[in-house]
Image: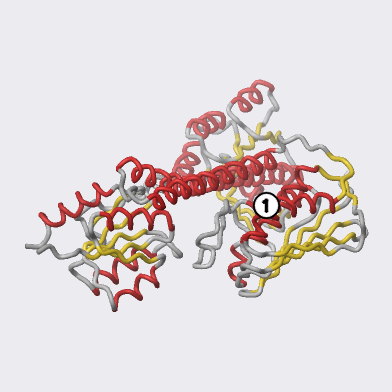
Amino acid sequence: MSEEILLTLLIVDDEEGMRLGVKRSLRKFSMDLDDTDEVVKLNVVEASSGEDAILLMEKSTPDIVLLDNKMGGISGIDVLHWINKNDLDLMAIMITAYASIETAITATKEGAYDFLPKPFTPAELKVSVRQAAAHLVALRQARELEKEKRRVRFQFISVLAHELKAPLGAIEGYLYLLRDGIGMEDPAVHDKVVKRSLVRLSGMRKLIYDLLDLTRLESGQKKRELSSIDVLESARNSIETMKPEADRRGISISMEINQDKIEMTADSGELEIVFNNLISNAVKYNRDKGSVTVSIENLSDTIRIAVTDTGIGMSESEVEKLFGEFVRIKNSKTRNILGSGLGLSIMRKIASLYNGDVSVESTPEVGSTFIVTLKKDIA
Amino acid sequence: MNEVKKVLIVDDDSDFRDQMEMMFSTRGYQVVAAAGRKEAEETFTSFTPEIAVIDLMMENDDDGFVLAYRLKKSFPECAVIMVTNVTGETGIEFPGANESSGWITADAILSKPVRFEQIEEELRKLGSNGNE
């Protein structure tokens, strides 16, 4: 279904015949916008003098104004000046009897969008109105998009601040205990206080690093060095990195591959981030003595990486929530697992650079499989 | 004879929970700690807290409020101190201490990290300004 955008057009002219002509020409006006399935329709209102036009515009701002210059009272340019002074969000089209350069220059200075020299045909009128409407709609959409971007950025920063405040507060709290010597008679308590402070600090560091990765990726500032890379090699490196933590909890990590070497054109740093995120999550959210399976498939033009764990899994609604920034599924089972909540956002951003994507299949209490697809040759 | 005061501490962040527990237990309080609203409510049958220190946002964003309300219903005499990380960045202003007006049934709201002196101060205020 296409959506209708109803714009109000105000025709300001002291000749009644002209106003009627414009109304008749635009009565069935309808315009499809190129990129969206929106249809623009017009609601035409009229004013027989500049003074009347201002009275009308004081009540409600039209979207397009067709403005005759030479009228009985104040001129079209005067009206245009008033519109400008009041900063109205509209497109003005000047109707000029004699296409005088002087009027044109003044009108342009006052922000007129277009000119219609008298006499004009209904077709010429429609073309001009069409252009003004398209321009106005595009302008408003761009403005809306910018506003939305600002809102998202603000939200991101507020959540980030909150995520940093939690560990900061925890460390501060421990420092107060140390300073005041509360509970410090027991060396085991002292050790625990120091150890926990360090754990929370490393969580903060991880959050900051993830944040830097994400902003570099989003700004496109990070220099990408694309070369031919063996995906299996990169996977093995990540497994090696996670091995100590996996061993500590009795979790086995295995690879499922049917080739000795799978090559693709990639930035080695990006590929490393993907594998590190996939494998460290599969270990973190696993049960003790569980297993992680890293399966890598070489499809015709795509590499499919699937990492399966035997962990706590997620319900359907949790999976749905997962794809936001800073989303960490908060429940009794994840309470003590540290994470920045940015890993998935980062992986998705990287996958999109390789025309691929990230998907999840999960069953609570059974485990999750995260699947990343990457196109082999993005050049 | 000094009666041992009972404190309920509820926070999903284990570090804050441990810190509060250390502060209270070294001062001779009897402490029960819970990591969430449900866990806290389960203690209601066996434990009668005189002071409760609860985190505002736990598994659900309003767990602290809900818990404070239920605590006050079950134990009207219990002093409820809400601790939060939220003020500041959201710009939400909570009513100050002793203004348990409206639907927030906490007696005091403090920002994290909380120092024991702050809690003592709030308890002192509650004691002197509280119901006769």
Q: Which residue is mark 1?
A: A26
Q: Residue at x 66, y 42 (%)?
A: A213
> Which image quadrant is residue A327 in?
bottom right
Mark 1, Cα crowd under 10 Å, few <14 / some 14-19 / many 20+, is some
The C terminus of chain B lies in quadrant? bottom left
Q: Is residue B56 left or right of residue A267?
A: left
Say how the picture is coloured: secondary structure
Residue A68: image x %, image y %? Answer: 60, 36
Residue B53's place in the image compared with A181, above or below, is below
Residue A212's place in the image compared with A350, above or below, is above
Q: Residue at x 56, y 39 (%)?
A: A14
For the residue pair A15 and A319, the one nearer the viewer reads as A319
Query: Which residue is most to the top?
Result: A102
Say which element carries label 1: helix
Q: Is residue A299 left or right of residue B85?
A: right
> Which image quadrant is residue A251 in?
bottom right
Residue B41's place in the image compared with B90, above or below, is below
Query: Is residue B102 among what the camera can see?
Result: no
Residue B35: image x %, image y %? Answer: 41, 65
The N terminus of chain B lies in quadrant? bottom left
Residue A15: image x %, image y %? Answer: 59, 41
For the residue pair B63 and B24, the one nearer the viewer reads as B24
Query: Which residue is most to the bottom?
Result: B45
Query: Is residue A99 among what the camera can see?
Result: yes
Q: Residue at x 47, y 41 (%)?
A: A52
Residue A262: image x %, image y %? Answer: 90, 54
Looking at numbered disc 1 in the image, what kind of residue is underneath it? Leu
In which chain is the residue bearing label 1?
A
Q: Is residue A210 left or right of residue A268?
A: left
Query: Which residue is most to the left?
Result: B132
